[in-house]
Image (tube, grey):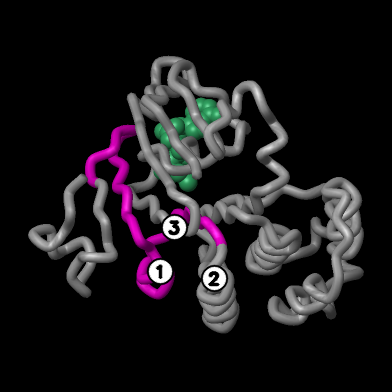
Amino acid sequence: MIVVQNITKQFGKLKALDDVSVQCNSGECVLLIGPNGSGKTTLIKSILGMVIPNSGTIFFNKKDIATDWTYRAKIGYMPQIGRYPDNMTIGHVLEMMKDIRGNQLDKLDEDLIDAFKLKAFLNKRMCTLSGGTMQKVSAALAFLFNPDVLILDEPTASLDAETKKVMSQLIETVMKDKTIIMVTHDDFLMKFANKKIEIGNGRIIGNYDTDTAGSDGLNNVASYNLL
Ligand code: ADP
Ligand code: MG
């Protein structure tokens, strides 16, 4: 379970997050929505410990993440923009990540590489890849270690239609036993969410329980359980 309690993050004069509190229970799929620059990625990076809030506390399974970093091993993260060493091949990057995570993987990696059609690109250097192929590498890495928690930041941005479908099927398959936090505005991913959190200018402006919401989603405000 992830509990974000009253976090504020300031970049110079800009308040990217302003007293934000969010809860994601185990097994839930929580969706973060809001316009560009509203603070979604900053919130995700705060949960990952990549951004340190100026105030507030974040708990992962009841432990304060500021005092215990080991929780990160339980998370698969797909960044909005993946950055990898230019001269490494996809194959090298995958191997390096396996080494770092210390995981003994079985067939899962082959399946993911097949699903994202990365096999033909394994010997290609990262600096030669298109944005979409780079996203596929990020996607494969997020799912690779069978993590309890998936944090996906605009996972289908710059993917082609076929790969968007693969991503959607993958999320549908794993969501039964995983906790997911994702930023997306794609309808076919939004439908998986149990809860939608809307952020505007660094503040939570809506918190909707979508399990009981109408099928037309956010437009049908009357049917939400406003928390
Ligand atoms: P979103 O993901 O919702 O588009 P972000 O969380 O990336 O928004 O950004 C929120 C605001 O914080 C933006 O105005 C962005 O420019 C600013 N910001 C994000 N990261 C940094 C940073 N490292 N340094 C300075 N400003 C930042
Ligand atoms: Mg973002």
Q: Is residue 30 left or right of residue 142?
A: left
Q: At label 3, which amino acid type do we have?
A: Glu
In which quadrant of the rendered view does residue 210 lie? Answer: bottom left
Q: Nearer the viewer, residue 198 or 69?
A: 69
Q: Residues within 10 Å of mark 2 (few under 14, many from 20)?
A: some
Is 86 inside the magenta-drawn segment? no
Mark 2 → mark 1, Cα distance in angstroms? 8 Å
Q: Nearer the viewer, residue 84 or 181?
A: 181
What residue lies at 59% left-to-right and 53% top-to-bottom?
149
Place of residue 50 in the rendered image (x, y in percent of width and height, measured from the top left)? 62, 32
Query: Upstream in the sequence, badge 3 or badge 2?
Result: 3
Q: At label 1, which amino acid type do we have?
A: Phe
Residue assigned mark 1: 192
Q: Which residues are magenta?
A: 178-206
Q: Quadrant of the C terminus?
A: top left
Q: Is residue 75 visible?
A: yes
Query: Upstream in the sequence, badge 2 or badge 1?
Result: 2
Place of residue 187 in the rendered image (x, y in percent of width and height, measured from the top left)? 36, 71
Mark in the foreground, 3 or 1: 3
Q: Is residue 166 above or below residue 62?
A: below
Q: Residues within 10 Å of mark 3 (few under 14, many from 20)?
A: many
- Circles 3 and 1: CB distance less than 8 Å? no
Q: Is residue 64 above or below residue 86?
A: above
Query: Upstream in the sequence, badge 3 or badge 1?
Result: 3
Residue at mark 2: C-beta within 8 A of ligand 2: no
Mark 3 → mark 1, Cα distance in angstroms? 10 Å
Residue assigned mark 2: 171
Q: At label 2, which amino acid type do we have?
A: Ile
- Circles 2 and 1: CB distance less than 8 Å? yes
Residue assigned mark 3: 28
Residue at mark 3: C-beta within 8 A of ligand 1: no
Name the element at disc 3. loop
